[in-house]
Structures are given as structure tokens and as C-alpha cells.
Image (cartoon, rainbow, N blue to C red):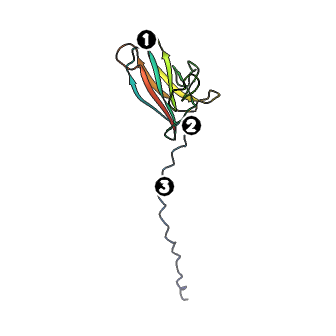
Amino acid sequence: PAPPPPTNTPVPAPTQAPAPTQPPAPPSPTYKFNIVVVSRCERQPAGNWYEGKTYVNGQPASGYKVVFSYAADGPPITSPVVSGPHPGYEGWDAGYYSHIINASGPKAGTWYVWVVDDSGNRISEIGQWTSTGPGDGCNQAVVDFDSR
């Protein structure tokens, strides 16, 4: 008997190398004010305070409420201060705010600063700065918030 005729052996089609994967996109900001910058801290023999501006897309924006505490997300120590011109502070620049922590001499401490909505819910990342108390250290900080 004759051997069976040869058959074509199927050849698999070449496969393409997988496309390189892109790293995942960074997560969307959790808070409206997703940028906080503590840009400087200066000597202040009169007491402790901080000031700064609230920005939206890099432009000063007024009407936002800024609070502070001795702990991140702790109870606000005072009522919020409103950024920008408002009754009693008509001369403030757009977005500007200032908060007094202690007006009768500087004291040492670590302070946490953030922006809240009308219900008191945090809508920003938290800024942190440390005052050094009496002497030539840091007792007046600048804390800015931006939403981008």
C-alpha cells in the first residue's frame, strides 16, 4: 500500500506584540481645593497668625471659608474666616484671608488649615505649619489654596 499523501500543516498566524500599556491616569482630585501651599513663615513677636489666598484655576477667588485646628480634620478652633472682601473687611483683596490664632504673644504649636463649605465639610487638602513661639522663629505663615 502507498503511504497517504502529505497534508499541509497549518501554520499559526503571527501574533502582534501587545501594545505597551500606559500608566494609569492619576486619580481625580478628591477636594475642590486640591492644592495647598505653605509658602513661608516669618517672625512675628505680637502673636500667631496665618494668611493667604484662595484661588480657582490660579485666579484669586473670594467667598470661601477657611478654618484651622490643632489636629488634621480636628474641630475648628474659631468660626471660619471668609476669603476676599466682605462686611467688616471690605478692603481685602480678592481671595485674601487672615486668621489670628493668638493675639497676645506667640506660642509654639502645630496648626492645620483647610477650606470648608457652608455645611462645614472640608473641601480642600490640609495645610500644616508649626509656630515656634517667642523669639525669631516662625509665627506668621502664608497658606494658599488652589483648585485646578
Measured as percent of width and height from the top left, residue 99 is found at: 51, 21
Under mark 2, the amino acid is Lys
Under mark 1, the amino acid is Gly
Mark whose residue sits in front, 2 or 3: 2
Residue situated furthest right in the rendering: 119
**Dot 1, how many residues are within 10 Å of its Cα: few (below 14), some (14-19), or many (20+)?**
few
Q: Determine which quarter of the picture holds residue 5.
A: bottom right
N-term mark: 1 or 3: 3
Q: Which mark is residue 32?
A: 2
Q: CA distance from mark 2 to mark 3?
A: 30 Å
Q: Could you tell me if residue 109 is visible in this image?
A: no
Helix, strand or loop under label 1? loop
**Dot 2, how many residues are within 10 Å of its Cα: few (below 14), some (14-19), or many (20+)?**
some
Measured as percent of width and height from the top left, residue 89 is found at: 54, 24
Q: CA distance from mark 1 to mark 3?
A: 57 Å
Q: Determine which quarter of the picture holds residue 120.
A: top right
Tell whether label 3 touches label 2 (CB within 8 Å): no
Q: Residue at x 51, y 48 (%)?
A: 25
Under mark 3, the amino acid is Thr
Report the front residue among 15 and 76: 76
Measured as percent of width and height from the top left, residue 14 is found at: 49, 70
Q: Is residue 30 left or right of residue 102?
A: right
Measured as percent of width and height from the top left, residue 12 is found at: 52, 72
Residue 132 higher or lower than 11, as above or below: above
Q: Could you tell me if residue 115 is visible in this image?
A: yes
The residue that disc 3 covers is 21
The residue that disc 1 covers is 105
Q: CA distance from mark 1 to mark 2?
A: 34 Å
Report the front residue among 53 and 129: 53
